[in-house]
Image (cartoon, coloured by chain):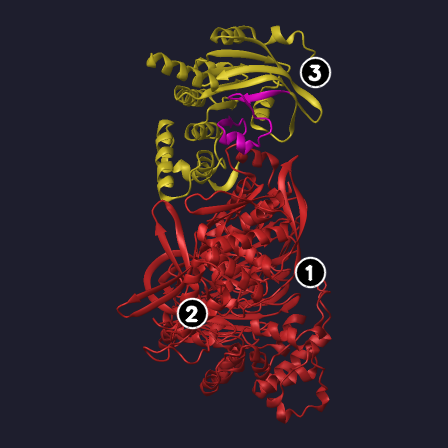
Amino acid sequence: MLGSQAKRVILVVFLKEILEFKDLHASIEGKEILKGVSLKVRKGELHSIMGPNGSGKSTLSSVLMGHPYYEVTSGDVLLDGESILEWSPDERARKGLFLAFQYPFEVPGVKFSTFLRNSYNSIHKKTNSLQDVAAFQKLLKEKMKDLSFDESFSSRYLNAGFSGGEKKRAEILQLMVLQPKFAVLDEIDSGLDIDAVKSVASAVQKAHKEGIGLLVITHYQRILHYLKPDFVHVMVDGKIVESGGKELALKLEEKGYAEYVKGVVLG
Amino acid sequence: MLFLVESVERIEDIPSIDLNKYDFKDAAKVKKIPKGLSIETVKLISKLKQEPEWMLEHRLKSFNEFLRRPMPVWGADLSGIDFQEMYYYITPEMAAENAKNWEDVPGEIKDTFEKLGIPEAERKYLAGSVAQYESTSVYANVKKIYDDLGVIFMDMDSALKKHPDLVKKYFMKCVPYTDNKFAALHGAVWSGGSFLYVPKGVKVDLPFQTYFRMNAANEGQFEHTLIVAEEGSEGHYVEGCFVKGTPVKTETSDKPIEEVTVGEKVLTHENRFKTVYHTQVRPYSGKLYSVTYYGDSKAEIKATEEHPFLVVKKERAEYKNTTWNPDWSPVNNIQKGDYLAMPIDREVMSSDVRVFNVNFGKSKGKFNSFTLALRTDKDFFRLLGYYLSEGTTIGGHYVSFTFNVKEKEYLEDVKFLLLKYFEKEPIQGKIRNNGISLTLCSTKAARFFNSEFNHHAHTKQLPLWVIHESPEKQAELIKGFWRGDGSYMYQQYSWGIKRMFRMNTVSSTLARQLRDVLLRLDVFAGINSQERANKHVMHTVYVGGSFLQKFANVVNAQPVNEFAVERQIALQKLSQASLAKSYAHITEKYAFVPVKTISFEEVVDLPVYNFSVDEDESYVAGGVAVHNCTAPKYTTNSLHSAIVEIFVHDNAKMRYTTVQNWSKNVYNLNTKRAIVDKNAKMEWVGGSLGSKLTMLYPMTILKGDNSSASHLNIAFGTSDTWKDGGAKVLHIGKNTTSKVIAKSISSGGGVSVYRGLLRINAGALNAKSHVQCDALILDKDSRSDTYPHNEIYEPTASFTHEASVGKISDEQLFYMMSRGLNEADARSMIVLGFLDDVMKEIPLEFSVELNRLIHLEMEKLGAVG
C-alpha cells in the first residue's frame, strides 16, 4: 500500500522534471529562424537533434538559454511546467539549465576553477567559506579525474589558449560539476579529431548516467556512434520534421538530409 | 589637510590684506596670508618658514619661471584652475585660530609642541587634530629602528633645518623648476612633504608608509618628497583601522563598518553628520585591541593598535574625574578606567506639522502612496512613545495597544491621543490576562506607524525626524515609552539601596536610539542586553545614580490610581534620597563612559576597515568617537601639485608605490622622477581610482650602465573622471632595461589616457625596452586613448611595444551568465581577469579596495542596462 503510493509519488516527481518546447517561434533581427519547435525532454533522457547547416539548431540552444539577441515571437519553453522566457540567463542556470557552447568564450586572467566556483556558488547557493570551498575543490578534483584532466588544468585561464578539444571537454567538465537538470550540448563534436570526439562522447555518457536530461545538437552523426540517444530528431528549416530512435541516425548517415531538404527552397 | 580645508572655508569673509603695508620684520605676527599668488606671497612663505637664503632665491627663480611659462595645452583641460583663487600657505597662527573650535585642545599640549620644536607644518596639524601628536609616539619604535640604521625619514621642513647640506645637494636637481609650469609653481610655493635618506648598504624591508609621513608633517597641496637611496641600499616607499562588523553611527542607525560607502553621512566627534569621502580596507597583521566600556554591555570595539580614540585619561584612581577635556589617543595607550567619548547629536529640527508619504498596497508593480499631514506636537510624541512600547499594527489596517488593567490612566490617554490625531475612536477590548487592548481601525494610522517605526517589536526604530526633534517633545516620547514598557527598581542590598529606572525593548536599534534621545535630555542611560532562550535579546535601557532625578522629572506621572501611586511614592522617596554618583559624565558635546576592559590579540591578515570623513576626520564606532586614519584630502576643484624626486645611486634599489582613491574633485598634477645610477633599479607602482583629473607620468632616467626601470600603472576612470597617466623613460647608460605596463579601465563615461615617452639616446648600447598598454572599455560612453611616443637613436637598442584595447562583448557576458553569474559578477570577473597579471604587484590593501570599487562600478552599469 505504502509502497505503491511511494512509487506514484516518485513517478509524479519524475514526470514533473521535464523540459518542454511548445510551438516555439523565434527570430533574430526580424528574421524568423525557429518556426514552431515542439519537443519534450524528460530528466534522464538523451535526445539528439540533427539537421543541416542553417536549420536553426544552434538558435534553439541560444533561445533556451536566453540569448539577448533572439526574440521569441510565439510559443513557450517550460521547465517543470513553468515558463522560462522571462528569466535572465543566470536565472535559467540557477533553475537547472545548462548550455555547452559551440564556441566557448575566452576570459583571460580568470582561472577556470575560480570561474567555475563562482558559478557553482551561485547555482547551488554556496559561499566562499572555507568549508564550501573545500567541498567544491573536492568535487572539481573528482570530476576532473573522471574526465582525465590533468590537475594543473583548473588553474589555467578560462578557455584562453585551450585547444579545440580542451574547450569542448572543459564545457562537459563544467556540466558535470554544476549538475544541472537539463543540458543542451551545441555541436559539442565539431572541429574535433576522432580521438577527441571519443573522449567527449564518453564524458557525455557519464553525464547521461548521472541522470541529466540531455539534448545533443549535432551536424554530423559520428558522435552518435559513441552515444546511445533515446530519441533522435531531425530539424530542418526551423522545425522538427521527424523523430525516432537511434535507427534514424543510421538512416541519416546513409542518406543525408536530402530527403528532408527537398521541399525547402535553398538559398 | 583637514586643517587647510577648514581654513579655506572660514577665511572667505576676511578682508584682503594690503601686502605692501606689511612689515616683514613682524612676519611672525602675520596671521593670514590671503588667497592668490604674488611675489609677496612667495617671499612671505619663505620668511615664515625661516628658510635659508638659497631656498628663497630658488623660490623666486621658480616664480619667475612660472610667470614666464604659458599654461600647457597638450593634455587634459586645465582651464578650471584659477591660481588667484587658491591659498598657498597657512600660518600656524591661522591654525591656532581655527583650533578655537577645537575647544578641548589643552594649552599644555600646545606648549609641549613648542618645546619640542615641532615644525609649523606639524603644528598646523596639532591645531586641527591632536591625533598627530599622539600618533607620533606610536611610531617611536619604528623611528628608533630607522635611527639605528642611520635612515633619515622626516618632513621636509625639518630636513631643511636639520640636514641643510643634504637637502641642498638634491633639492630640485632631479626635477628642476624649469621643467614645466607646475614644477615652477611648486618651486615657488612648496611646503610640507617628506625627506627619506637611506644610507649606503642599508636595506629596509619595512615600507616607508604615508601614514607615518603624515604623522611627521602635514601634507600640503604642494608637498615635496625627496628620496635618496645611497649605494647598495634598498627601500620601498608607499604613499598611502577597524574590524568588520563594527557598528558606525550613520544618520538613522548603526551600520556595520564594511557597509559604509562614500557619500554617506556619519556622526563625527564634532557632534554633527559629515559625509564619508573615502573608504578603505586593508589586511592587518599585528595587535588587535578589544575595548569594552560601562554603559553598554554589548558594545565591544576592535581596532588596530594605532587607531586613535577620543579619550579623557583618568585623573585619579577610585575617583571620578573633575575635568573633561578629551584628546586623541591610540588605542594601545588606553587604560581601564579612562573615559571614552560618546558624541551627543544635539541637532534640532523641530516642526509642529509634518507631511508623510505613506505607502499602501501595490498595483501594477508600483506602490500606491498617500500623503498624510499630522500635527507633530508635544502630545503626539507621547503617542509615539506608547506605540513604540505597547503598540503594534495588524494587517496594515489596525493599530493596537495593550495595557495592564491597572494602567487605565494610560489607556485613556492613548484613546484621547488617537482621537486627537487620527480623528477616530479606538475599540476597547475585554480584559484578558489582566490586559486590556485598544484597537484603532485606521489604514492611515496603521500604515503610518508601520512605515515610520516598523511593527515588529525587534525591528522598531526611530526615524530621523524623531531623532532630531526638540528635547521637550522627545521627553514626551520617553514618558510614553516608560509608561508602556518602563519600571522603577528600588532594592535594598547589604551594601545599600539600588535605584534604577528601566525601559525594555527587544529592538537593539531602538534601545540605542532611546539612549541617544536621553543624552539630548542630559540623562545618561546604560544598556544591558540579556540573551534569552528562544526569544529576542532583551535590551534594558537603565538610568541610575545622579541621573535618576532628571529622568524622574521627564517621566513624572500624576498619581491617579493605585498602580501609579506606587511609582509616585518611589519617586518622592527618590527626591529625598542622597544619590550615588554615576560613572558616566555628560557635557554639552559628549557623554563620557569609563573603559571596562581592554585587551589585545595577535591577528594575521585580518581585513580592517576605515574611512575618511569630511572636515572632522572622525566618526563614531561602537558608540564612541574615533579618528580616521590619517590621509590628505582636498576641497572641490583644488590643485594638488606635488613633486617627488628620487635618487637611486649605484647598486641601490627603490620602489615607489602610489595608491589613490579620491572621491572629491582634484586636479592631481604631480611630477615624479627618479635618476638611476649604475646597476641600480627603480620600480614605480601606481594605482589611481577616483579624482576629477589625474595627470601623472612618473619618469625614470636610466643614467648609469646596467640600470633598470619598471613602471606599472593601473588607472580606473569612472564617471566624471579623466585619467591621464603614463610613463617616461630615458635610456642613457649602456645595457639599460625598462619595462612599462599600463592597464586602464574606463566605465560610466570615464576617460583613460596613456601617454608615454620612451627615448633611447645614442650611445645607450644594447638598451632594451618593452612597453605594454592594455585598455578595457566597459561601455560605449567611455573612452581610452593611447599616445605612445618613442624615440630610438641607438641602433643596437631593442624596443617592443604592445597595445590592446578590449571591450566586454554581449556574447562574453551571455556565456558567463549562462553559468549562473549575474551581470555585475560577470563583468567584475572580466575586469579582474584583465588586471590579473598586475594584481600581484600592487599592495594588497589597494587590490582589495580596487576589487570592491570594480564591483560597485559594475553594479551601477548593470542597473542602467
In the drawing, does residue B817 fall left or right of residue B654? right
Q: Tell me where residue A185 appears, x and y as whole percent.
A: 50, 23
Which residue is located at x 40 percent, y 14 percent? Answer: A8
Chain on which label 2 sits: B
Q: Is residue A65 visible?
A: yes
- Residue B572 has which mark? 2
Specify the segment rendered in magenta: A75-103
Say which element carries label 2: helix
In the current view of this chain or complex, which residue is farthest to the front? B561
State the residue in front, A125 or B280: A125
Q: Is residue B694 above or below residue B446?
A: below
Q: Amino acid at mark 1?
A: Gly
Of all chains, the one bearing label 1 is: B
Name the foreground residue: B250 vs B298: B298
Residue that mark 1 sits on? B75
Q: Quadrant of residue B530?
A: bottom left
Q: Residue A249 at what x, y percent from top left?
A: 50, 9
Q: Which residue is mark 3?
A: A267
> Can residue B557 be found in the magenta stretch?
no
C-alpha separation, residue under disc 2 versus residue under disc 3: 102 Å
